[in-house]
């Protein structure tokens, strides 16, 4: 575990990017390497409402979900030093990128639509928005969503290519 003086200035690190880019996996690994707390905002949100995100989304719709997501982002009590995984859409609504960048550092894990499609097609996690989409249809869907979202993701403090991701690569980004 790093000494306190090594952690000074670490603060909050938010990982952002499209679903399937590895935000949760890499946030957990980076937090372990840095000796600080890990948080997954999707899990915080689910604990707050007592249901899964797909259940909440289905029951209340996207607008209410995005409002709740904003509340969770801004009102959660964070540890002094933490690596935080965000939902794929969270950076793209309200003033979330500005908020994250003013409360810490953000890292965009960037991957191509084809790589994301390959990962999502083989993922164990059920993602209702992707139901029934495979192959070229899935790639086209991701290309469209990335076209809408990437301007937000690119507001991150750091952009890291996710194809050959490592904890060291993330550490190098935040050390700059």
Image: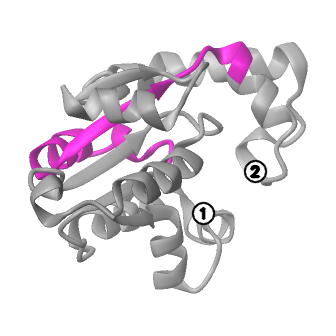
Is the N terminus in the top left, top right, bottom left or bottom right quadrant?
Answer: bottom left
Q: Is residue 100 left or right of residue 112?
A: left
C-alpha span from label 1 to label 2: 10 Å
- Give the colouring mode of the picture: one colour
Q: Which residue is mark 1?
A: 57
Picture layout, residue 46 above or below residue 26? below
Residue 85 in sight here: no
Mark 2 neighbour density, 10 Å: few (under 14) some (14–19) many (20 or more):
few
Residue 146 is inside the magenta segment: no
Q: Which of the pair 33/38 is nearer the observer?
A: 33
- Badge 1 or badge 2: first in the primary sequence: 1
Residue 22 appearing in the image: yes
Q: Position of residue 50 (x, y in %)?
A: 58, 86
Q: Residue at x 59, y 20 (%)?
A: 164
Looking at the rendering, the stretch of residues picked out in magenta corresponds to: 87-115
User: Which quarter of the picture shows residue 160?
Assistant: top left
**In this picture, is 160 found above or below 131?**
above
**Residue occupying the point 89% across, 19% down:** 135
The residue that appears at 21% across and 47% down in the rendered structure is: 100
Q: Are marks 1 and 2 in contact (CB under 8 Å)?
A: yes
* Residue carrying label 2: 128
- Secondary element under disc 1, as helix, strand or loop, is helix
On screen, residue 106 versus residue 142, left or right, reads left
Residue 35 shown left or right of residue 101 in the figure? right
Closer-to-camera residue (69/18): 18
């Amino acid at each position: 575990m790093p000494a306190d003086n090594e952690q000074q200035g670490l603060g909050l690190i938010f990982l952002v990017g499209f679903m399937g880019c590895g935000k949760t996996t890499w946030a957990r690994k980076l937090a372990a390497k840095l000796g600080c707390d890990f948080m997954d905002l999707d899990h915080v949100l689910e604990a707050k409402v007592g249901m899964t995100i797909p259940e909440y989304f289905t029951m209340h719709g996207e607008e209410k979900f995005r409002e709740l997501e904003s509340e969770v982002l801004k009102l959660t009590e964070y540890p002094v030093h933490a690596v935080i995984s965000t939902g794929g859409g969270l950076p793209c609504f309200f003033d979330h990128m500005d908020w994250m960048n003013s409360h810490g550092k953000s890292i965009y894990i960037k991957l191509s639509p084809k790589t994301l499609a390959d990962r999502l097609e083989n993922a164990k996690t059920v993602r209702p928005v992707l139901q029934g989409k495979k192959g070229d249809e899935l790639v086209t869907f991701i290309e469209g969503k990335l076209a809408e979202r990437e301007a937000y993701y690119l507001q991150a403090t750091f952009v890291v290519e996710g194809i050959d991701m490592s904890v060291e690569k993330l550490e190098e980004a935040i050390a700059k």
